[in-house]
Image (cartoon, grey):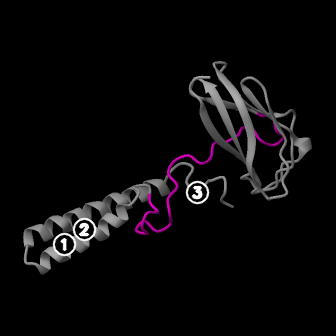
């Protein structure tokens, strides 16, 4: 075995109508490039907890048996592959659905951009608070130039944090995550 990868992906009914077993023309298929060998595939999470998902895998594809997916129902599959970096595509023919849409793209942004360690910049909000504390300390100890440098660092961190938060909120698929209602 060479170049072992773990890939995790989910399937979710993000619409407002149920998808019935009878709506599937055939099994849902996840295809990998022929140079990719699937070593294992398993369902790791389901919602609701009583959702039963039956999958199987062949050399370079995962097959998912038709199932009932009510609005908000989802499941996550984890797969180990070998060979080239996994790149997959799906094949599905489901009544009333013209194509599958990707979700979970872009940053997952917390609703409050200054809550510590909840932002894509991994701690930029803490940098704002640390820089403000350093600026206060420098001001108290009568080092005005250092206080202005730390204030500038706090302002720059705040602008970057808000900018990235805003870009994440405005993303094409913002808010469409597998585990969100």
Residue found 31% across the figure and 64% down from its top: 127
Q: Relative to residue 42, is residue 158 drawn left or right?
A: left
Q: Is residue 73 left or right of residue 114?
A: right
Mark 2 lies on residue? 131
Q: Which residue is mark 3?
A: 175
Assess whether mark 1 and mark 3 are in contact (beta carbons under 8 angstroms).
no
Location of residue 153 in the rendering, given as x and y in whole percent from the top left corner: 22, 62
Q: Is residue 124 left or right of residue 35?
A: left
How far apart marks 2 and 3 lie (CA) works out to 31 Å
Q: Is residue 111 magenta?
A: yes
Disc 1 secondary structure class: helix
Residue 53: % across, % down: 83, 46
Q: Secondary structure at mark 2?
A: helix
For the point 7% across and 78% down, the residue is: 142
Of residues 149 and 94, which is closer to you in this image?
149
Image quarter of the C terminus = bottom right
User: According to the image, label 1 marks what residue?
Assistant: 135
Q: In this picture, is 147 found above or below 4? A: below
Question: Which sits earlier in the primary sequence, circle 2 or circle 3?
Answer: 2
Classify residue 38 as left or right of residue 25: left
Q: Separation of disc 3 and disc 1 at Cα? A: 36 Å
Q: Which residues are magenta?
A: 92-119
Q: Does the magenta run of residues contain 70?
A: no
> Earlier along the polypeptide chain: callout 3 or callout 1?
1
Label 3 Cα crowd, 10 Å radius (few <14 / some 14-19 / many 20+) = some
Residue at 84% in and 48% down: 19
Q: Main secondary structure of the magenta part?
A: loop
Q: Are marks 2 and 1 in contact (CB under 8 Å)?
A: yes
Query: Nearest the camera: 149 or 59?
Result: 59
Does dot 3 land on a helix, a strand or a loop?
loop
């Amino acid at each position: 075995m060479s170049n072992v990868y773990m890939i995790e992906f989910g399937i979710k009914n993000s619409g407002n109508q149920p998808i019935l077993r009878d709506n599937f023309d055939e099994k849902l298929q996840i295809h990998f490039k022929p140079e990719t060998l699937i070593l294992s595939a398993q369902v790791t999470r389901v919602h609701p907890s009583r959702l039963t998902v039956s999958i199987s895998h062949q050399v370079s594809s995962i097959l998912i048996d038709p199932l009932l997916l009510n609005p908000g129902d989802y499941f996550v599959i984890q797969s180990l592959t070998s060979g080239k970096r996994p790149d997959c595509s799906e094949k599905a023919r489901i009544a009333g659905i013209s194509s599958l849409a990707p979700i979970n793209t872009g940053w997952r942004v917390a609703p409050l951009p200054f809550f510590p360690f909840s932002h894509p910049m991994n701690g930029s909000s803490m940098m704002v608070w640390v820089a403000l504390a350093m600026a206060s300390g420098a001001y108290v100890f009568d080092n005005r130039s250092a206080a202005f440098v730390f204030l500038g660092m706090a302002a720059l961190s705040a602008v970057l944090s808000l900018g990235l938060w805003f870009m994440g909120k405005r993303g094409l698929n913002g808010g469409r995550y597998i585990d969100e209602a």
